[in-house]
Amino acid sequence: MKLLLVGSGGREHALAWALAKSPLLTKLYVAPGNAGIAGIAQCVAIPATDFAGLRDFAVKTGIDFAVIAADAQLVGGLWDVLEAAGIKALGPSKAAAVLEGSKGFVKDLCMEKGIPTAAYKRFREAASAKPYAASLGFPVVIKADGLAAGKGVIIAADKTESDKAIDFMFEGGFGDSGHEIVVEEFMEGEEASFFALSDGVNVVALAGAQDHKRAFDGDKGPNTGGMGAYSPAPVLTPALEKIAMEQFIKPTVAAFAERGLSYMGVLYLGLMITKNGPRLVEYNCRFGDPEAQVLLPRLKSDLLAALLAARSGTLDKIKLDWSGDVALTVVMASGGYPGTYEKGHIISRLEDAARLPGVTIFHAGTENRDSGVVAVGGRVLDITATGKDVAETRARAYAAVALIGWKDCFFRRDIGWRALQR
Ligand code: AMP
Ligand code: GLY
């Protein structure tokens, strides 16, 4: 079957790499892709934001199935645009992507279903939000309701910061996504993510992972999309994974069905493991980036068959096998990320690094030029390794990182520290 994957980051390279192994696949197109993806699929120069262009390409090319990887496209309704033109796609739909598109909606759903999460209230104006925030005590968490490119959460240390954050959001600091806000209690604990696949009725567990959101070693510095990840997440014991499915994922999918919203696609459950047990931090409606880069190398079953089953309502027939190995990825980024950075520097020794044992390199922000492969993004490469334990896997990944370079590149040297400490 002919497949179209939409996106261009490291997550999309990992998805393309896993999908390319499927015996069901005849041809894989990726729009727009990157230099690494171009080595295993046909890249099509249509931006992920050009919904009409993607639809027209899919119709003209006779695409049998499309996979939409990113939140902006899912919340923006690309699934609906493709399906309206007769192209089967892995969603969720725009209506069901509210799972990630509205934090307030998800909190209300948690209340209704008894899903453990932080105490909260939703607000549409600052005057009542400020005293509620103060009543929760500090630190307190202020969230823009909608998507804000991963930046919509402010943890306020005191009343001054909290009032400032609330005013900032209502004054349009995060654009439209802050017209409504959620004020919630600060939860203490260790964060982990758990992934599952749903066809609207049936759910299948994927696996757990942990990422490193801060830019610098020791979890310091500004928040990023993620500077590294590993799977499995040792903090997620088998007992906790069972709780994640039974007390979080299943009631959520059921609540969507009760609202007439069939949730078809990936559920990314962000958990805080507190001393009183796991509590929901947030949901996303897609694979994580860089979490996909460590989940997919551990999946022994056919990813395409599983995603098709999620679209067709037949996930009850799917059983997934996972490798017991550890996977770990180190993100190599451009100097300055998550702020401004230079583009166009040539990356050296990629091939040498890729030949090391257990190493797979996923490209995130690269382009093929006449001069070679160049860095064009903030996050540029995901140096991924598999191995029998965290120590071996991390050594393998960093051996590859040591070979690769370009002007001003940087990376964290402590990916996996929590897992190693256990
Ligand atoms: P989100 O965009 O919802 O993932 O939030 C970004 C980050 O803010 C999370 O990964 C957590 O580290 C932190 N966070 C969000 N909500 C809370 C909370 N209620 N308590 C503590 N930390 C939180
Ligand atoms: N790594 C965090 C995310 O994909 O949202």
Image (tube, grey):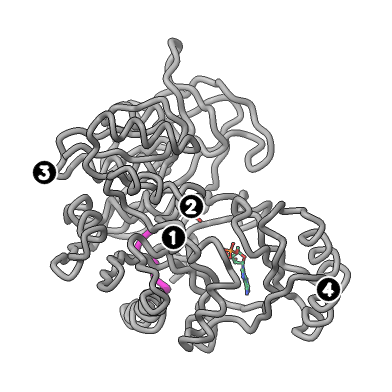
In primary-sequence order, the first of circles 3 and 1 is 3
Q: Quadrant of the N terminus?
A: top left
Element type at marker 4? Answer: loop
Q: Which residues are magenta?
A: 230-236
Determine whether, in the image, residue 175 is placed left or right of residue 271: right
In primary-sequence order, the first of circles 4 and 3 is 3
Determine whether, in the image, residue 316 is placed left or right of residue 45: left
Task: Give the residue at mark 1.
Answer: 285
Q: Nearer the viewer, mark 3 or mark 2?
A: 2
Q: Residue at x 42, y 76 (%)?
A: 259
* Mark 1 neighbour class, 10 Å CA radius: few under 14, some 14 to 19, many 20 or more: many
Q: CA distance from mark 3 to mark 2?
A: 28 Å
Q: CA distance from mark 4 to mark 2?
A: 32 Å
Q: CA distance from mark 1 to mark 4?
A: 32 Å
Q: Residue at x 57, y 65 (%)?
A: 102
Task: Give the residue at mark 4.
Answer: 158
Q: Is residue 234 magenta?
A: yes
Residue 11 image-quadrant placement: top left
Query: Disc 1 vs disc 2: Cβ atoms closer than 8 Å?
Result: yes
Determine whether, in the image, residue 347 is placed left or right of residue 18: right
| Vertical comparison of 165 with 65: above or below | below
In primary-sequence order, the first of circles 3 and 2 is 3
Q: How many labels sit on residues? A: 4
**Mark 1 C-beta closer than 8 Å to ligand 2:** no
* Mark 2 neighbour class, 10 Å CA radius: few under 14, some 14 to 19, many 20 or more: many
Residue 410 image-quadrant placement: top right
